[in-house]
Image (cartoon, rainbow, N blue to C red):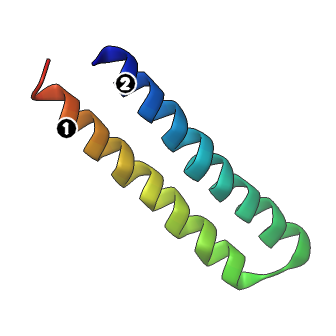
Amino acid sequence: MYYLRVLLTIINLGLFGVGSFLCFIVAVSQSLDRLLIGGVFLLLLTFANQKIISKFFSSND
């Protein structure tokens, strides 16, 4: 179970965390407001997914 938790955390941060970072970079360099809003939503989704992962595995430890 520990390895699955680590794997899901890496996937979560890898997909959503890096995606939000790239949205922020493109939004700042290209002056696109919709990508800035998309980056904020992706960052919030990253935190929500991480909370779900930690709550799911904390009850099974």
User: In terms of depth relative to the viewer, which is nearer, 30 or 4?
Assistant: 4
Q: Residue furthest right?
A: 29
Q: x, y percentage for residue 42?
A: 54, 62
User: In terms of depth relative to the viewer, which is nearer, 29 or 19?
Assistant: 19
Residue 12, compared with residue 59, is above or below; it is below
Image-quadrant location for residue 9: top left
Residue 34, compared with residue 17, is above or below; it is below
Q: Where does label 2 land, which residue? A: 4
Residue 39 as seen in the image, left or right of residue 59: right
Residue 45 as seen in the image, left or right of residue 58: right
Q: Residues within 10 Å of mark 1 (few under 14, many from 20)?
A: few
Q: x, y percentage for residue 17?
A: 59, 47
Image-quadrant location for residue 40: bottom right
Residue 39, compared with residue 37, is above or below; it is above
Q: Amino acid at mark 2?
A: Leu
**Measuring 53% from the left and 31% from the top, which residue is drawn there?**
10
Q: Amino acid at mark 1?
A: Lys
Q: x, y percentage for residue 43?
A: 52, 57
Counting the numbered discs, the total is 2
Q: x, y percentage for residue 2?
A: 32, 16
Residue 55 image label: 1
Residue 6, compared with residue 35, is above or below; it is above
**Measuring 51% from the left and 69% from the top, which residue is drawn there?**
41
- Element class at badge 2: helix
